[in-house]
């Protein structure tokens, strides 16, 4: 007995049962748990027959037969006066048949993934409808823009390097654009899911995922319009900046996963220090009873912004490569400081690419990433002081000042042998 085929039939039975259970729970008149289970088993058996008898027509013939049965059932329903006939169950039945056949003829793991995903998609119908109903024009614009830059622009770009320093690869540059915009879009739609009033801690976390700089500007301005929210604004700004450091680690991890263990420890220490400062500010918030809603974030996926980031990333790539070649690694600190003032994501990705190609040691790399992060903290602190109240300036000077001093100490004294 071929136990592998028996396992395949068992998987087909389970997937059919799962999808059929959902369809019957949805009170569909077309097919329920028994019908979907039988369709799934029929797909697997058809695949086995096609394989064993080396006949490519058996599987599609049975598929056409299933489709014919669905058409007949729909016609009967219409004749009985049921004109509200959808297509979800019919398409699900055909897909279930195809998945079961693919379990035999193709990749079994992929078939299980598709079948499981289909059952979840069918189950989440009402939640998807509720989410779509809440979408605004800018939300749909964000989705379509992200789809455009990732599914249309990215595939057509050449995957080869250009320029005298051999670092400008249009495909890789735009891939980084997709990564950054994708992270911002994820943060934005988490905000859409959890709502506007999510609690002070969530406001800081979401602000860091979407844009810590935009969060700093929004909350600094709020302290001029609202009284007694200075500590809360300082907490959210500091938390967003701490989460931005996590974002930096995610970006580096995606580029150099095999070297992440060599750079993560000092950056985690910096994050812990900033987390402790956030805890202190949160204690003061609870003591003073401050609470505020998170400002509505802007569209995180705009083609103009994506294009500007791509150009900025390309320029920083050139600057990092040129500086490293002509002046050595020590001169990269100046590039990191200047770049960090405007966008820490671009310099992080540039330095990660350099470490990936062994053009920069990890010991120097994490120090440059941290100095760019500290430079960005300084820039946001200045913005908070210019746009916010005097009390906000005092709290930000305390939290950012300690963070910058600790970061500089880590850069100065951290032993090279200390890594995971």
Image (cartoon, grey):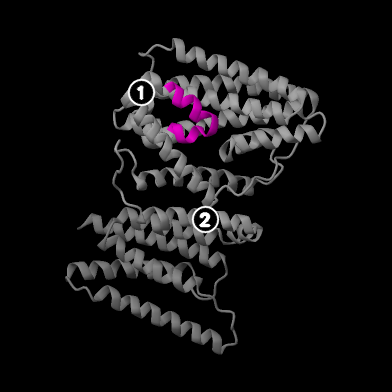
Q: Residues within 10 Å of mark 1 (few under 14, many from 20)?
A: many
- Name the residue carrying label 2: 145
Image quadrant where one finds the N terminus: bottom left
Name the one closer to the observer, 32 or 419.
Answer: 419
Q: Of the numbered discs in the image, which one, if any, rests on residue 362?
A: 1
Q: Give me the residue at 45% from left, 56% from top.
A: 117
Whether the residues at callouts 2 and 1 have beta carbons within 8 Å, the answer is no
Residue at screen point 32% across, 51% down: 158
Disc 2 and disc 1: Cα gap in Å? 35 Å
User: Does the stretch in magenta take in 220?
Assistant: no
What residue is rendered at 28% in x and 73% in y?
59
Query: What SS does tag 2 mark?
Result: helix
Would residue 228 be seen by someone viewing this image from the given angle?
yes
The residue range painted magenta reads 333-348
Rendered image: mark on residue 107: none
Residue 392 point in image, percent of width and height: 73, 25
> In this rendering, would 61 be left or right of 69?
left
Residue nearest the viewer, comparing 418 with 166: 166
Q: Main secondary structure of the magenta part?
A: helix
Q: Is residue 18 above or below residue 330?
A: below
Q: Does the magenta run of residues contain 336? A: yes
């Amino acid at each position: 007995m071929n136990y592998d085929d028996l396992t395949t039939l068992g998987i087909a039975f389970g997937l059919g049962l799962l999808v059929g259970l959902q369809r019957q729970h949805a009170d569909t008149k077309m097919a329920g748990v028994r019908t979907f289970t039988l369709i799934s088993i029929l797909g697997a058996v058809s695949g086995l027959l096609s394989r064993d008898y080396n006949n490519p027509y058996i599987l599609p013939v049975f598929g056409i037969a299933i489709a014919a049965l669905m058409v007949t059932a729909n016609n009967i329903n219409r004749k009985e006066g049921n004109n509200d006939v959808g297509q979800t169950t019919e398409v699900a039945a055909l897909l279930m048949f195809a998945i079961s056949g693919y379990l035999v003829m193709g990749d079994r793991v992929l078939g299980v993934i598709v079948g499981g995903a289909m059952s979840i998609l069918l189950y989440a119908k009402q939640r998807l409808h509720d989410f779509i109903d809440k979408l605004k024009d800018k939300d749909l614009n964000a989705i379509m823009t992200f789809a455009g830059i990732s599914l249309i622009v990215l595939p057509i770009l050449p995957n080869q390097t250009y320029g005298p320093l051999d670092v400008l690869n249009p495909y890789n540059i735009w891939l980084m654009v997709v990564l950054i915009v994708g992270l911002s879009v994820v943060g934005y739609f988490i905000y859409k899911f959890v709502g506007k009033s999510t609690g002070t801690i969530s406001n800081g976390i979401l602000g860091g995922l979407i844009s810590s700089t935009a969060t700093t500007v929004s909350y600094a301005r709020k302290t001029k319009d609202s009284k007694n929210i200075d500590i809360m604004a300082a907490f959210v700004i500091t938390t967003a900046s701490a989460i931005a450091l996590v974002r930096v680690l995610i970006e580096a991890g995606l580029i150099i996963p095999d070297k992440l263990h060599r750079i993560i420890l000092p950056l985690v220490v910096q994050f812990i220090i900033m987390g402790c400062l956030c805890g202190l500010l949160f204690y003061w918030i609870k003591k003073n009873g401050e609470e505020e809603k998170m400002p509505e974030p802007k569209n995180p996926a705009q083609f103009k912004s994506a294009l500007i980031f791509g150009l900025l990333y390309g320029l920083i790539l050139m600057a990092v490569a040129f500086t490293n070649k002509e002046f050595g690694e020590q001169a990269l600190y100046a590039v990191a400081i200047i770049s960090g003032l405007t966008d820490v994501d671009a310099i992080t990705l540039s330095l990660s690419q350099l470490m990936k190609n062994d053009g920069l040691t990890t010991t120097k790399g994490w120090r440059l990433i941290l100095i760019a992060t500290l430079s960005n903290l300084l820039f946001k602190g200045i913005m908070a002081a210019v746009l916010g109240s005097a009390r906000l300036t005092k709290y930000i000077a305390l939290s950012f000042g300690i963070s910058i001093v600790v970061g500089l100490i880590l850069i100065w004294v951290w032993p090279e042998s200390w890594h995971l």
